[in-house]
Image (cartoon, helix red, strand yellow):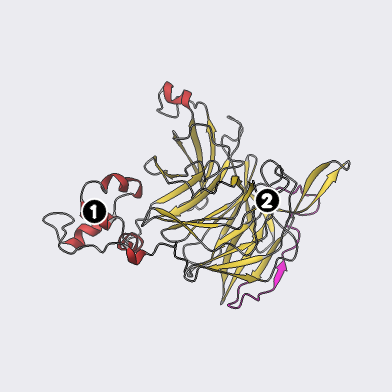
Amino acid sequence: MPSQLSSSSSLEEIDETLILIPGLPNDVGEHILSLLPYSHHSRVKLTRKSWNLFLSSKTLFSLRRIHRRLSHLLCIFPQDPHICSPFLFDPENLAWHPLPPLPCNPNEYGLCNFNSIALGPYLYVLGGSLFDTRSFPLDRPCSSSSAFRYNFLTLQWDRLAPMLSPRGSFACAALPGTDQIIVAGGGSRHNMFRAAGSRIRSVERYDVGRDEWVSMNGLPAFRAGCVGFTVRGDKKEEFWVMGGYGESRTVAGMFPMDEYCRDAVVMELKENGRGNWRRTGDMWGEGERPRFGKIVVVDDEEGGRPSVFMLDNKYILRYNMDTNRWLKESRVPRANVYGGSFGFVVLNEELHVMTPVNGVDSTETRWSRQQKRVGTLFSQIYHPRKKTWRFLVTKPPFNEPLDFNTAVMCPIRL
């Protein structure tokens, strides 16, 4: 392990002589404190030394998982995380909590199209596209191979071993039951150059314990802008890569355009990483208009097949793995009322359709006129099993409205 990695074993052990709650055994006090929402921890830690130690220990996260009291949070990266702090959003308590920015490299700027994924009490930021003052020409982006991890125990960022291949706009998934992350495809595409940049096929797997990246069999073809997820079946586990674009073409020999992928590719995961890829075939029927909206995955808590959804304008589509077709699931109640960009993310098995607005209908919310002028974040939340919609309004801490076309979001349970 690199010397710059923080080890949880270096944390100060909880002194048994310290009383968590006077008059109660410490095991009872631990249970009570473990029920506090994570968004309240920063204030509670200042109350007592023993509370600070307990709320910064692995024991806390173990108890929260055992008692199923995890807070379902959303980490939002509004801009380049080197210069703009990411924020944790707790939708249940309408609370926001800032995280420190990434360690800064003075030669790099404009990081975007990176991937963020949560694994236990850690948040990973991998790859991306950026500008490097040491590269030429200066007006073209390049891919990044950097990897960072935020430790919610030490409240610090750690620099990890870099990926074998620099990449941005790639598929990424955590392998269930293991401390491993798999990444696939990507390239150097940047927000300022939509169809320019490189494409790659390489696939890698990261071992958290060893801080090591291992190469796997590459994708059948170049693909970037895609999503990745795992599917568990009878005695086998698969890694799916869906959506995205392959090669680019030009219109009239001048304007570059992406060639979007109409299929998904699947690898059966094996210990040696030598699994072969297979194609699902065209996911759109004859005469059917292909749709290329944002894709999210709802994992099955029982270990079964996940549910895959796509947000296409005002409709939510569900993917049927058996028929390899997308079917209409529901219609967003207020899809075109406010305009602007939409975020699409999964939190606690619900689909959140999010958009920043300058004001909302006073009959539906209780925000003051001053708060409406500042701007709010309006979420339309769909529950796939109950087939119901609900609405949520909050005032974000950002100085400028979120642009969900470029912002990166990552669900995390703490």
Query: Where on the picture, by quarter, is residue 20?
Result: bottom left
Q: Which residue is mark 1?
A: 51
User: Horizontal and vertical percent for residue 372?
Assistant: 46, 25
Residue in the picture at 67% in, 56% down: 186
**Callout 2 amino acid:** Cys
**Callout 1 amino acid:** Trp
Span highlighted in magenta in the image: 268-292
User: Horizontal and vertical percent for residue 63?
Assistant: 31, 62
Structural distance between the alpha carbons of marks 2 and 1: 45 Å
Residue positioned most to the left: 23
Q: Which residue is mark 2?
A: 142
Q: Secondary structure at mark 1?
A: helix
Q: Secondary structure at mark 2?
A: strand
In the image, 337 versus 26, the foreground residue is 26
Q: Quadrant of the C terminus?
A: bottom left
**Mark 2 touches mark 1? (CB < 8 Å):** no
